[in-house]
Amino acid sequence: MTIILFIFFLLIYFSLTFYIAYNGWIWLKKSFGFRFKRTYFFVVLFISISYFLAQFYSISGLLWVGYIWLVVFGYSLLLFPLLNILFFVMKKKRLNTRKGLKWAGFSVTLFYLFVFIYGSYNMWNPVVVSYDIEVAKESELDEIKLLLVSDIHISETIGPKTITELINLSNEVEPDVILLAGDIIDSSIEPYYSHNLGEIMAGLTAPLGVYAVLGNHEYYGDDIPTFIKEMNEIDIEVLVDEAALIEDLFYVIGRKDYSDFNRLPIDDLTEDVDHNKPILLIDHQPREFDKVGAAGVDVMVSGHTHKGQLFPGNLITNAIYENHYGHIQLDELHTIVSSGYGIWGPPFRIGSRAEVVEINVRFN
């Protein structure tokens, strides 16, 4: 069955690749008289498999070619059918399609340049997003400043420079507590070792501690004990379905990822905590808000969605999740979802921005 699905995937993928390549060929041939048909299709074929080849051969240039192709592939499947329909109508009305084809090709090329330039800017220039919220509980603290960081996705793409910038942003915010909402690594922990990122991430500190949870990508690496051990060595406490009482002031609860069928119900995690104290929850995926609110949680922070990362992905995540990005208060529960600091796959963002989140919590 797996082989059949794989063959089906290849048929669909290469059929769509041919559709995109054919449209490009028509533009080059009719607009510029381009004649090197075999060379053209061979180059497109190589580019279309470059991302998959990069999974087996550690060649950074090959990976970047693959990333660019994936973006071109996705947006071409949105643009080309519309252009095909437009030119079909133009032919029916006996309009000049040759001139229109030339300008359509230039327009698509400019669109891709915009995506790569603007998308890179959104990815590699992270911002600090701030929310001010109020929790209706008494505390010895009048307020507390949290820093939420989600979806770092440490990999060959997200390395020392990006992590150093994260430390700088954290130092600018000067949080009391740092909450890491999962997907710290992309899958394999190897880039964490090869780039000596432990030394850099050790600079991620806060007076009341740094707490993390597992995201779905930590499970992909299939070496969670090693990951937790590495985090503990740099004073990042990974909470795996457990609650931590911080300085007898408030609780931080960390859940296993939603994809883990063995994770405990939220009621079990809040059963033995003092509900007179503020309760903060880190859960990688923004789900089960109704159950979380009923369990007495005051603030829930999440990531996972990347806010779609690339338009129109943000429209899809908005349709799937009750809160796919930002701050929404549901009765007494504050839900805050970050678009994430890193990326999965192509290092571009359209319709979202790389960020860390400053949360100023006032107790009343």
Image: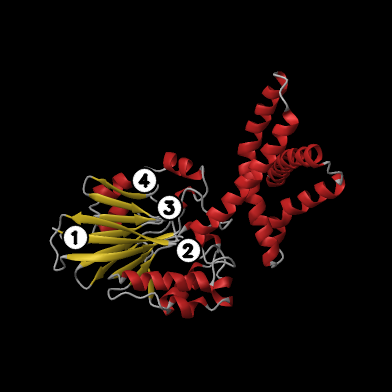
Q: Callout 4 environment at 10 Å: few (<14), some (14 to 19), or many (20+)?
A: many
- Decide which of 322, 169 is in the foreground and name it: 169
Residue type at mark 3 is Tyr
**Distance of mark 3 from mark 4, alpha carbons?**
16 Å
Q: Callout 2 environment at 10 Å: few (<14), some (14 to 19), or many (20+)?
A: many
What residue is rendered at 59% in x and 56% in y?
346
Residue type at mark 2 is Ile
Q: Is residue 349 left or right of residue 93?
A: left
Considering the numbered disc 1 on the image, is that residue within a helix, a strand or a loop? strand
Q: Is residue 207 above or below residue 260?
A: below
Considering the numbered disc 3 on the image, is that residue within a helix, a strand or a loop? loop
Q: Which of the numbered marks, if any, corresponds to residue 258?
A: 3
**Distance of mark 3 from mark 1, alpha carbons?**
29 Å
Q: Which of the numbered marks, if any, corresponds to residue 152?
A: 2
Q: Is residue 333 above or below residue 105?
A: below
Foreground mark, 3 or 1, reads 1
Residue type at mark 1 is Arg
Q: Earlier in the sequence, mark 2 or mark 4?
A: 2
Q: Which of the numbered marks, if any, corresponds to residue 362?
A: 1
- Decide which of 160, 364 is in the foreground and name it: 160
